[in-house]
Image (tube, helix red, strand yellow):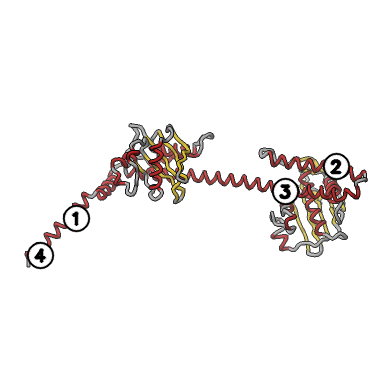
Amino acid sequence: MLRLLHFISTVQMVLSLALLGALFFSLSFRTKIKVFITKHFFANQFDYRHEWLKLTHCLNARELDENVYTTALRGLTQAVDYQVGCFIQVQNGELKVLANIDKPNLNEDERAVLLELSVFLKSKNWIIDIEELRTQPFIYEELKVNFSRLEAVSFQLVIPIYNGEKFWGMAVMQGSDNTSKKLNWELRDYLTAVNAQVSNFLFHHQAAQELAENSQFAAFTRMSAFIVHDLKNVMAQIDLILSNAKQHKNNPEFIEDTFETLQHTKLRMDKMLIQLTEKNASQDDVNSLVELSESVKQVVTQRCASYLPVPKVIIISETPVVLDKDKLCNVIYHLVSNAQQATSDDGKVDICIELSANNKYMLINIVDTGCGMSENFMSTRLFKPFDTTKGNAGMGIGAFDAKAYLEKIGGQLRVQSELSKGTNFTLRIPTN
């Protein structure tokens, strides 16, 4: 019995020693032990604080004529003191070189190898050492590559670039005989951290660029909407002339008014064409000293007098103000035209012009006896762009444009209305 127990304990000891030996001689086990010892008992290869400041300075010091990809590549190469590199995007199975530093065009073998590596990198976020791949291919499990082509590859490191979780491209780098580094655990960790910072820099820049482009398209769309709105007003004037031509074509005053209106219409259309064709043309207001009563009478006479009810202009007191006369006339026309459309032919539309009690504002009150508006409509829809009650006939930006312009010049557009009783728009225009 004692012999049996002794035999069993001996067998257990032998098996334990065999297992320990197998672990010790295992490549992965020895690698892990080596990394553990190096991490905890040896000095680091890099001064991380210094390297991080150097990388930050490199990314912030982008020259005006340098694209963002070159800056990103320079950050990666300088991080390990390499001299040669390429920044490559992989898109639809094609390689697109976006930047290079002292690297001639990729040869056919290099392109083929990189396409093979890209398939692997879509599922494995690994930094690849080409020399290590040549001599120890078993380290890169599941990587299938043509080793005859691999011999023609000149670069040493392949660093994958990811946009979020999606493989985007890669940076390939090459050092000189004096600067080439072995891809150990520390260099991998260090390059992974540097790559994360460079990727953030790159994709934040791309997002900002896309946002800027979207803003440009939005600005062009906004400008186009206002131009279409003005074109509708121009067409309304031309329709008005044509509708009265048969009845008044022999009237000298009508002919004179027609030519005056056409001249004004041509000037407005010229201005719109400049805005559309010359994207760099100044869009600033052309300000001048304006008599409000003169501008209001001009709008009523040339653009509103042929519709009922005919607006009545009442001048109580005034002082000249500095603003864009054409812009003001468009605002007045929109508000007066809306008042006429909301009012029956036997109703009233009055335009009252007066100086405020404190002399700080000129007030233009456009008062109608039309259908009025509800509190809910005024608070939720009246000044909302592209919201119209006129169907396809309206753009829904007139009231919004009027309010925006008055606020831009330091004024206000106020409205009071009651259903079935009418509306009063008050334009408050600063006098200084």
Which quadrant holds the C terminus?
A: top right
Q: Nearer the viewer, residue 247 or 295?
A: 247
* Residue 16 x/y as whole percent: 17, 57
Q: Earlier in the sequence, mark 1 or mark 2?
A: 1
Q: Give the class, few, some or many, for how many residues have Cα within 10 Å of label 2's Cα (few <14, many ≥20).
A: few
Mark 4–mark 1 distance (CA, rounded to whole Å):
21 Å
Residue 268 locus on image (x, y percent): 77, 42
Nearer the observer, 359 or 338: 338
Please say if the residues under marks 1 and 2 sit with CB atoms less than 8 Å apart. no
Q: Is residue 192 above or below residue 390?
A: above
Picture quarter containing residue 199? Answer: top left
Q: CA distance from mark 4 to mark 2?
A: 122 Å
List the residue tagged with mark 4: 5
Q: CA distance from mark 4 to mark 3?
A: 101 Å
4 or 1: tag closer to the N-terminus? 4
According to the image, label 1 marks what residue?
A: 19
- Mark 4 neighbour class, 10 Å CA radius: few under 14, some 14 to 19, many 20 or more: few
Residue 260, disc:
2
User: Which residue is at 69% across, 60% downward?
Assistant: 380
Q: Are marks 4 and 2 in contact (CB under 8 Å)?
A: no
Instruction: Name the amino acid type tagged 4.
Output: Leu
User: Upstream in the sequence, badge 4 or badge 3?
Assistant: 4
Q: Which residue has dot 3 on it?
A: 228
